[in-house]
Image (tube, rainbow, N blue to C red):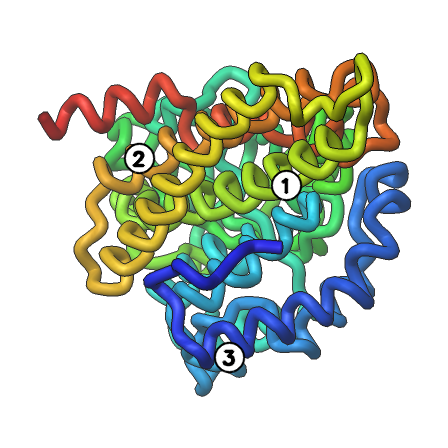
């Protein structure tokens, strides 16, 4: 369990909310984790249950069906989700997609989609990555070319979280291919549109219950009113949302690291070797002591970053630094924890195995660690 006694970003009201989230996960999440991992997707029923419990898109304004709460509530949902060892895509909907629609969408778009996203009736995705492009979003090849009062969308996307379940996809596409980054727009594509196809639910190293898909767009026609915000402003919109997106990943990483640490402490205190517990070996205590110090610094930094984000002051460089630090810490803790489990750590029946597998991609998506270092370096 995440220790709240020394946290500085949360108050009693948020602690009560956290208790509600934990109770909900005890009932609706924990019993289903292994099944979702095996099936490679989370039930839509879980989304509806999350909506009914008030866990989806807490920052959406009341006029669109939300609670109008600040990012700390998103953080609580995310921390407890990743501490549980789940990779359900609800955080993508709450932390990323909802803000794009609320910040840049038309009134019609907000009224159409936000209430359904809050309730869990609609599942959403954002399609950035393509087979030939990764972090370089200006190089996307998917196009949305005007034809009268419609866009004709053509292209393919890959590694798209929620791709198998998504009812609505924000597609990063070029409405003016000759204009480079200034020709990028965000186009809303409903999954019911003719010409839209889902590919494979991709076979990943980890995060097995997070459906991750290929998506194909073959002459998909959508009205020009499906442009999110202004045409040609998409790249700027994407950049403006990066601090929160990367802070959200940092939140997930720190919580998962805490679970890995807790599992390792429990295991090493229980497991005997050479007539003593594994914890009693100096190497174990030194390793865990060093990780404990880093975890302490990590929680303090995370609360600082959350508070700064609430003030509207978290910069792109600071958000990138947070993602870099916490995802690298997550990997260090998970890898050391697996090592201290010995052979048991390599067995899927132990939680550390899943935590280790799921940790690896955290240093890749949302911007690789190498890109994070570059962003931070540019601010020096």
Residue 229 spot, x, y in % from top left = 33, 58
- Identify the mark nearer the N-term, 1 or 2: 1
Q: Is residue 217 left or right of residue 148?
A: right
Give the distance between the C-alpha atoms of the residues marked 3 and 2, in whole angstroms. 28 Å
Extreme residue toward the bottom, this view: 63
Crowding around mark 1 (Cα neighbors within 10 Å: few <14, some 14 to 19, many 20+) is: some
Q: Quadrant of the C terminus?
A: top left
- Identify the mark nearer the N-term, 1 or 3: 3
Q: Is residue 69 above or below residue 9?
A: below
Would residue 147 be seen by someone viewing this image from the given angle? no
Displayed quadrant of residue 273: top right
The residue indicated by pointer 1 is 262
Numbered disc 3: secondary structure: loop
Crowding around mark 3 (Cα neighbors within 10 Å: few <14, some 14 to 19, many 20+) is: many
The residue indicated by pointer 3 is 66
Numbered disc 1: secondary structure: helix
* Circle 1/circle 2 CB separation < 8 Å: no
Residue 27 spot, x, y in % from top left = 82, 67
The residue indicated by pointer 2 is 320
Q: Is residue 5 above or below residue 241?
A: below
Residue 59 spot, x, y in % from top left = 44, 71
Q: What's the residue at 63%, 41% (across, down)?
A: 262
Give the distance between the C-alpha atoms of the residues marked 1 and 3, in whole angstroms. 34 Å
């Amino acid at each position: 369990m995440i220790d709240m006694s020394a946290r500085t970003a949360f108050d009693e009201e948020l602690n009560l909310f956290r208790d509600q989230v934990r109770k909900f996960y005890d009932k609706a999440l924990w019993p289903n984790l292994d099944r979702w991992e095996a099936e490679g997707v989370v039930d839509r029923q879980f989304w509806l249950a999350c909506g009914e419990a008030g866990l989806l898109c807490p920052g959406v304004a009341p006029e669109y069906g939300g609670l109008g709460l600040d990012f700390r509530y998103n953080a609580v949902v995310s921390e407890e989700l990743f501490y549980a060892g789940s990779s359900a895509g609800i955080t993508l909907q709450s932390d990323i997609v909802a803000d794009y629609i609320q910040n840049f969408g038309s009134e019609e778009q907000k009224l159409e989609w936000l209430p359904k996203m809050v309730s869990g009736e609609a599942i959403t995705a954002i399609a950035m990555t393509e087979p030939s492009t990764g972090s370089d979003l200006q190089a996307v090849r998917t196009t949305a070319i005007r034809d009268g009062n419609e866009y004709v969308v053509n292209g393919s996307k890959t590694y798209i979280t929620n791709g198998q379940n998504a009812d609505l996809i924000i597609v990063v596409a070029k409405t003016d291919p000759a204009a480079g980054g200034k020709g990028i727009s965000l186009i809303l594509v409903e999954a019911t549109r003719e010409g839209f196809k889902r590919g494979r639910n991709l076979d990943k190293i980890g995060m097995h219950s997070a459906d991750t898909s290929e998506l194909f767009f073959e002459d998909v026609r959508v009205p020009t009113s499906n442009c999110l915000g202004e045409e040609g402003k998409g790249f700027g919109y994407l950049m403006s949302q990066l601090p929160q997106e990367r802070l959200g990943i940092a939140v997930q990483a720190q919580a998962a690291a805490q679970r890995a640490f807790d599992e390792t402490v429990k295991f090493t205190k229980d497991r005997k070797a050479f007539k003593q517990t594994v914890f009693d070996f100096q190497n174990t205590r030194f390793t865990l002591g060093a990780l404990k110090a880093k975890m302490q610094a990590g929680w303090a930094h995370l609360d600082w970053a959350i508070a700064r984000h609430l003030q509207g002051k978290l910069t792109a460089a600071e958000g990138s630094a947070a993602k870099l630090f916490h995802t690298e810490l997550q990997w260090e803790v998970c890898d050391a924890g697996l090592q201290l489990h010995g052979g048991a750590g390599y067995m899927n029946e132990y939680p550390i195995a899943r935590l280790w597998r799921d940790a690896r991609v955290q240093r890749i998506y949302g911007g690789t660690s190498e890109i994070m270092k570059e962003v931070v370096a540019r601010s020096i």
